[in-house]
Image: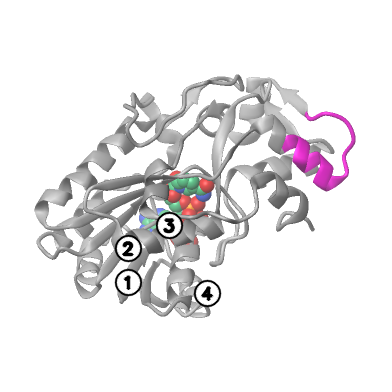
Amino acid sequence: MKIFCTGASGYIGGSVAAYLAAIGHRVTGLVRSQDKAAAVSRLGITPLMGTLDDVAILAQAAQAADVVVNAASADHKGAVVALLDALAGSGKPFIHTSGSSIVGTRARGERSDAIFDEDTPITPSPARAARVALNEFILAYRDKGCRSVIVCPSLIYGAGRGANPNSVQVPLLIRLAKKRGNAAHAGPGENIWSNVHIDDLVTLYALAIEKAPAGSFYFAENGENSMREACEAINRMLGFAGPPTAMSMAEAAAEWSEGTTEDTMASNSRVRAKRARQLGWQPSARSLIEEIEQGCYRE
Ligand SMILES: NC(=O)c1ccc[n+]([C@@H]2O[C@H](COP(=O)([O-])OP(=O)(O)OC[C@H]3O[C@@H](n4cnc5c(N)ncnc54)[C@H](OP(=O)(O)O)[C@@H]3O)[C@@H](O)[C@H]2O)c1
């Protein structure tokens, strides 16, 4: 099939695009610089120069494709409108990437017991209200002749296949651990994130392209860990003795910014990928703790 992928030079989009190209699809990837064009070409992806604001380029690329994967941004409404309007009436799949911080609770490093599957009602934080509204907007295209589908990953780990091999949270924790000579979490670090290996995530995109019904939404996770567990594994990986440090929220915000600290590093985001498993998804890659201790994060 002909697949158009935004975010083709990024962690998620690059991994998905490279995987789809490797299994025999013809993939065109949106890029915004010549060096990223060269990088995606090396992975068998045909580069298309443009940005998420170039609505005419997006619409033309969507119409020329059999499938669109939108992995550049969970939040860019202009691009979503351009792509969906181009696909309306075609019945083609549109696979959008959201993120499980939509169920996140700001918790200053404390644990929350709230767990969400796709049927659990969500009351998003003000920081994620627009993302949840965008998801609803996308799913409504099920009634406009478009097979709109959302994949909503939790914390992603593992080496990406694309030009950007690095995700967000684990590399942030490792960089800080190396700087301090000890891993560190925000507050007590008892806050929990569900997580998914990038190698498993790409197979969910392929499955969604193949058979997800119009208007479906899929969390992606295959386990969960507290930030303290991740930090303990990082200390073992780096050979640092003793327990990780509990930073104050102000200290953490000085390292990671306030928004990243509150919504990503000190929050909870506990989801269950019930519908993806019902679709036939079988995640099998190693766990977050194994990946930190024995996998791609070791030097
Ligand atoms: N990583 C995670 O753990 C995770 C989990 C859940 C959800 N998400 C969400 O998924 C989305 C992608 O995440 P990611 O980790 O793959 O990010 P990433 O590695 O930074 O990749 C983003 C990609 O989108 C491209 N891009 C961004 N803005 C663009 C624009 N205005 N025009 C054209 N291209 C643009 C980037 O191009 P350049 O290479 O030129 O910068 C890059 O290829 C984000 O919205 C993120 O919040 C991420």
Q: Secondary structure at mark 4?
A: helix
Dot 1 corresponds to which residue? 3
Q: Earlier in the sequence, mark 2 or mark 4?
A: 4
- Residue 47: percent from the left, percent from the top? 40, 76
Quarter of the view holding residue 135: top left
Q: Badge 2: few (under 14), some or many (20 or more) residues near its Cα, within 10 Å?
A: many
- In three-dimensional space, the C-alpha distance between marks 1 and 3, rounded to whole angstroms, equals 15 Å
Highlighted magenta segment, given as a residue range: 231-244
Given this view, does label 1 or label 3 mark the residue nearer the observer? 3
Where the C terminus falls, by quadrant? Answer: bottom right
Dot 4 corresponds to which residue? 39
Dot 2 corresponds to which residue? 209
Where the N terminus falls, by quadrant? Answer: bottom left
Q: Are marks 2 and 1 in contact (CB under 8 Å)?
A: yes
Three-letter residue code for mark 3:
Leu
Kindly tell me whether residue 53 is visible in this rendering.
Answer: no
Q: Secondary structure at mark 3?
A: helix
Given this view, does label 4 or label 1 mark the residue nearer the observer? 1
Three-letter residue code for mark 2:
Ile
